[in-house]
Image (spheres, helix red, strand yellow):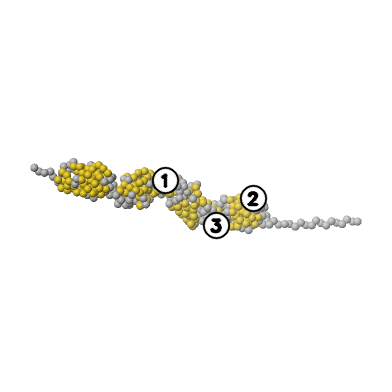
């Protein structure tokens, strides 16, 4: 029997490769200068022939798998479509946005204490989406993006002068400096007491007193003050009572306290004796209150030597003077007392 001819092999259909599909670009924004890595997620990435950001080819790319590509963004501006091409065609696009680099114009205040905690307002442009605010290499304790032109940040602890920068997807800004200042230190007050009415000029000595923003006697501000140098302030004590802490505040913080005492004014109640000769040498005891800190005893305009016996008594010697009366008073850091009358009697004439 004649063999039948075998049928020709059936033609195999050609299967066209599917076009790749893009799902996301991470991150989906970056600096106008480019050169940042962007991860493209999707499918059908086998045999990739190009990756484009708009019409510009990626600086480079690596096909990690059929579902992921790592591409290096080229330079660009605005929002552009990212696409992937393979032998199967060109993918759909996902949007990638070029962000302008942030610009920092000012930092206010520009100084604060080494302990940190200063609330600082950063002004500039391109702040939207800020991902970091740094004082030197240290992140701000916290920050709030108020607008594209303003950020409020809390300074961390630090020392010296540090560059403040803002980072967004557009890159890191230029630097504006913030200065950390030491807290002031008080060493001495002179005098350390004065009248309850205030008005005493007090010299405060210490360190880091420059830029003082407040001098306080207890919770009350000094009537006035002058920063003479980084180590000295002259302040006028306000009215007050009792013992109060004196402090100085600068952008570096508030100083340690030193004690200032308000002293009541002295009061004279009795001179014993209240009369004596015109010649010097007659002993007189002044009685009253608030006499412990006596700094002067006057008979009229004449100052005399004295001895403080107690808070209620001072001994002195009446100076020479013409016959008649003279006013006697006492001065302490609390002020000058009321006056009592001392009478000089001329010796008898024979």
Q: CA distance from mark 1 to mark 3?
A: 46 Å
Badge 1 or badge 3: first in the primary sequence: 3
Residue 191 visible to the viewer: yes
Quadrant the N terminus occupies? bottom right
Q: Is residue 303 visible?
A: no
SS under mark 2: strand
Q: Is residue 134 left or right of residue 95?
A: left
Q: Nearer the viewer, mark 1 or mark 3?
A: 1
Q: Which mark is residue 78?
A: 3
Q: Quadrant of the C terminus?
A: top left
The residue pinned by badge 2 equals: 64
Which residue is labeled 1 in the image?
182
Residue 245 on image: x %, y % = 36, 48
Position of residue 92 relative to residue 235, above or below, is below
Label disc, if present, on residue 194 of the rendered structure: none
- Decide which of 209, 261 is in the foreground and name it: 261
Q: Earlier in the sequence, mark 3 or mark 2?
A: 2
x and y percent of residue 208 in the render?
39, 45
């Amino acid at each position: 029997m004649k063999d039948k001819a075998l049928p020709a092999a059936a033609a195999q259909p050609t299967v066209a490769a599917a076009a790749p599909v893009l799902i996301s670009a991470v991150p989906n924004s970056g600096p106008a200068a480019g050169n940042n890595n962007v991860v493209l997620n999707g499918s059908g990435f086998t045999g990739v022939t190009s990756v484009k950001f708009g019409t510009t080819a990626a600086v480079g790319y690596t096909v990690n798998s059929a579902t992921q590509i790592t591409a290096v963004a080229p330079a660009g501006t605005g929002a552009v479509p990212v696409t992937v091409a393979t032998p199967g065609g060109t993918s759909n696009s996902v949007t990638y946005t070029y962000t302008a680099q942030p610009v920092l114009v000012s930092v206010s205040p520009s100084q604060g204490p080494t302990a940190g905690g200063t609330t600082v307002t950063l002004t500039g442009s391109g702040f939207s989406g800020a991902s970091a605010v740094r004082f030197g290499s240290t992140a701000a304790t916290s920050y709030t993006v108020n607008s594209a032109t303003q950020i409020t940040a809390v300074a961390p602890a630090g020392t010296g002068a540090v560059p403040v920068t803002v980072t967004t997807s557009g890159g890191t800004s230029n630097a504006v400096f913030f200065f950390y200042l030491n807290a002031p230190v008080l060493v001495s007050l002179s005098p350390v007491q004065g009248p309850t009415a205030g008005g005493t000029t007090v010299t405060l000595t210490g360190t880091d007193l420059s830029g003082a923003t407040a001098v306080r006697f207890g919770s009350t501000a000094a009537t006035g003050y002058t920063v003479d140098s980084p180590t000295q302030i002259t302040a006028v004590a306000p009215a007050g009572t009792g013992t109060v802490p004196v402090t100085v505040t600068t952008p570096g913080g508030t100083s340690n306290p030193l004690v200032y005492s308000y002293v009541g004014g002295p009061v004279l109640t009795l001179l014993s004796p209240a009369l004596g000769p015109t010649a010097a040498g007659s002993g007189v005891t002044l009685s009253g209150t608030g006499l412990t800190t006596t700094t002067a005893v006057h008979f009229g305009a004449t100052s005399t030597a004295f001895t403080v016996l107690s808070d209620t008594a001072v001994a002195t010697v009446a100076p020479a003077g013409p016959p008649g009366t003279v006013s006697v008073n006492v001065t302490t850091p609390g002020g000058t007392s009321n006056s009592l009358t001392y009478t000089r009697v001329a010796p008898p004439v024979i």
